[in-house]
Image (cartoon, rainbow, N blue to C red):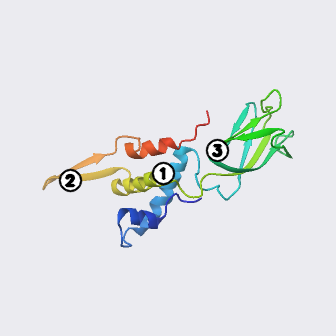
Amino acid sequence: MANLISRTEYKSYMGITSANKDTEIDILIPKVSQLVKTYCRRTFIDYYSDIKVEYFNGGFNTILLNESPVKEVLSVGNSTDYGQNYTNLVEYTDYVLDGDQLVYIKSPYIWPEKLKAYKVEYFGGYEDTPEDLKLAVLDLVEYYSKNNSAVHVNRDVTPNVTQINYVNSTNFPAHIKRVLDQYIADYA
């Protein structure tokens, strides 16, 4: 899937003009992009122009779609044979799109619960990575580049002694976490 930033953006952000670190950058960018997507539980840009297909069991009054913001719902299908065949539902007759969720509008106003009962095809996400998220991803690539993910040698204390700090937290750096937390998809 698509990376949230490019090597060119990273090198420009960091003021890097040589190709010395290109291999390391090319390794880190897809891994950090996937880490951010996993942490936030969404892909941001992958389904802006590619169809996203999701299946739901029902039992709720709304179906919350994973990719936000929703750009366009192509179809909502209903299956009575556990996902073998789907019949299209009609917008404004069976359901209404309200932001990033589909609301069932037939009495009793709850999507009837059945296994693999609903299939939704849609476009969602952003055309480009939002600028604040891009900044967090750029900083996160730099964080992993400098810290080698585990150990960071701070400085020589004396000529014969080196001080080593180990990463002792599972949290992202605070300035990065603040941005990522704004984009976490909440399906509760």
Circle nearer the N terminus (2, 1): 1
Residue ID at (39%, 62%): 13
Q: Amino acid at mark 1?
A: Leu
How crowded is the residue under tag 2: few (<14 C-alpha within 10 Å), some, or many (20+)? few
- Label at residue 133: 1
Residue 2 image point, x, y percent: 57, 60
Image vertical order of residue 156 relative to residue 87, above or below: below
Q: Amino acid at mark 2?
A: Arg
- Label at residue 107: none
Relative side of 113 to 135, left or right: right
Residue beneath disc 3: 66
Relative side of 77 to 175, left or right: right
Circle nearer the N terminus (2, 3): 3
- Of helix, strand and loop, which one carries label 2? strand
Q: Nearer the viewer, mark 2 or mark 3?
A: 3
Residue ID at (81%, 40%): 92
Residue 41 image point, x, y percent: 57, 44
How crowded is the residue under tag 3: few (<14 C-alpha within 10 Å), some, or many (20+)? many
Q: Nearer the viewer, mark 1 or mark 3?
A: 1
Q: Is residue 13 visible?
A: yes
Q: Is residue 57 visible?
A: no
Image vertical order of residue 116 relative to residue 146, above or below: above
Relative side of 45 to 150, left or right: right
